[in-house]
Image (cartoon, rainbow, N blue to C red):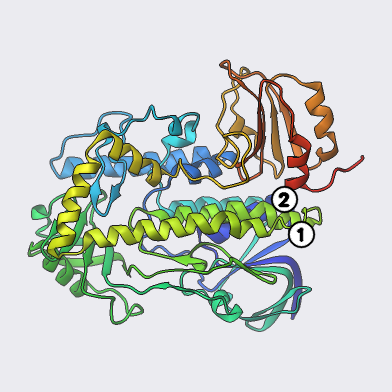
Amino acid sequence: MNETCEAVVVGAGPVGLMLACELGLAGVDVLVVERRTEPDHTIKAGAINVPTAQALYRRGLLPQLRAEQDAALSRFAEFRRNSGMAPIGTGRRPAVGHFAGIVLDVDAVDFDDPDFADAGPAAGVFLVAQQSIEAILARRAAELGVEVRRGTQMTGFRDDGAGVTVDCGDHTVRAGWLVGCDGGRSGVRKIAGFEFPGLGPEITGRQAIVDMSGAEDLRMGWNTTASGLYAYGPMPGRVLTVEPDGPPADRETPVTAAELQRSIRTVSGVPVVVTAVHSATRFTDNTRQVPDYRKGRVLLAGDAAHVHSPFGGQGLNLGIGDAVDLGWKLAAVVRGWAPEGLLATYTAERHPIGAWVLDWTRAQVALMRTDARSRAMRAVTAELLASRDGATSVFKSISGVRHRYDLGGGHPLVGSATPDIELADGTRLGEYFTGPEAVLLDLTDSADLRSRAAGWAARVRVVTAKPAQSRELSALLVRPDGCVAWAADRGDLDGLEESLARWFGARTHA
């Protein structure tokens, strides 16, 4: 049996689903194939950063995120009560993250820093687990009519330059493009022959949800010991250990209660007894990245393009960022209006962010070593992170608010995530991205601006509105992924048409 579609996405994790939703929103005929018959419920990332929350908010999914966070906070509060800990005050974050297990003090972070300005309501959503994100995106894909075919193994493909023929068990799929979102051991990456340079692992980490006795002697949060690190909480039965004794001998065998019990006892010194394992995984600090995210008509996103340790929860967010950046660009190519070189900007923009994350996680592993020099460096780092400047700087990195793309200068906002400007009619800028178009925000009711943008009406939505508060900013061109492509102060429209053509192709004459 043979079938055709415009794009095949391999992998139905959050990255593959996010990409498929972005393509489906733009009307691309996309097929998602996934070897698993059911979603993977193995414990993974437990939180999202600001760019991820904003990406989902712009697609109208903020209520679902809030509902998941409310449920998570309730479980967290119950765990604190049962553990005899003081409750967290209403509206206060229970934590703002950690660096190498050094937890940042929420009261030390300067949330009045300009980088946190105009982040909008999405910035208040953070405690949403990876499984919840996957479930939200699966429902979204179904609403968009995207087919997610589970229990289907991609066994090979052939890129002939005009398209890709994908082998899926007993049939083939002919597609214009193939995107590997199939994880750190990506079959797409291996078959296509992408290089994957980097550093090998030196630790073994284990994360699990378990039932155990003797846990009352485990200390909550992150703890450093002579044998490594461990974390207990913030959810019932959640435990994580890090042992700096090299990678595991076998990543494939199931993690047993005996293995977890030994690791917890070794690192914590507490004689717990693990009686049941509900979810468990091993991880290492293997850090690798492909030099180019595209090879012919094959592209990679998420862990297929880069792997690293999970410290700081950057992997989920990095992959969602890949999907959001790639989605509208690949859709533009499929639809035939993409300007020359648009797809090349995917690697140009996302590779530096990925490289930063790899270094961010490598630095944390260096501080987790148990030798005297590393412990001394850890103590110095902890002192710096306790300061207002140190805590604020690190939290800006953890939260993702300082990430930006180098788009070649211009207005200071160009290359950054769009500010979620509050408008006088009670709406916010982020609410205007539920379709596949870019948004050109006109804050001065400029007939000249609207006339210049008329040739891109099918691809760029013009929103004319007054800001709720006075601003020097007069106009803002925002790509479908939420990145500012052009901005102007005090009515200056220089560069608008060049930017429209650069990102959204030739002017049309309707």
Position in image of residue 473 (x %, y %): 62, 24
Q: What amino acid is found at the position of numbered circle 2 in the picture?
A: Ala
- Name the N-terminal-most of marks 1 and 2: 2
Identify the residue at horizontal 56%, vertical 61% (top origin).
Answer: 16
Q: Nearer the viewer, mark 1 or mark 2?
A: 1
Query: What is the residue that sits farthest to the front in this orientation?
Result: 409
Asked if residue 138 shows in the view, the reply is no
Q: Residues within 10 Å of mark 1 (few under 14, many from 20)?
A: some
Report whether 391 appears left or right of 397. Answer: left
> Which numbered circle lies on residue 26?
2
Query: What is the residue that sits farthest to the bottom in this orientation?
Result: 170
Position in image of residue 95 (x %, y %): 28, 41
Residue sitting nearer the eye, 423 or 71: 423
CA gap between label 1 and label 2 equals 10 Å
Identify the residue at horizontal 76%, vertical 75% (top origin).
Answer: 161
Q: Residues within 10 Å of mark 2 (few under 14, many from 20)?
A: many
Where 169 falls versus 467 (above or below)?
A: below
Q: Secondary structure at mark 1?
A: helix
Residue sitting nearer the eye, 356 or 443: 356
Q: Quadrant of the N terminus?
A: bottom right
Where 469 falls versus 401 (above or below)?
A: above
Position in image of residue 311 (x %, y %): 33, 57
Report whether 233 appears left or right of 426. Answer: left
Position in image of residue 197 (x %, y %): 46, 73
Q: Quadrant of the C terminus?
A: top right
Q: Secondary structure at mark 2?
A: loop
Report whether 284 appears left or right of 86. Answer: right
Q: Which residue is mark 1?
A: 334
Quadrant in the picture for residue 105:
top left
Query: What is the residue that sits farthest to the right in this orientation?
Result: 510
Cβ atoms under marks 1 and 2 closer than 8 Å? yes
Q: What amino acid is found at the position of numbered circle 1 in the picture?
A: Val
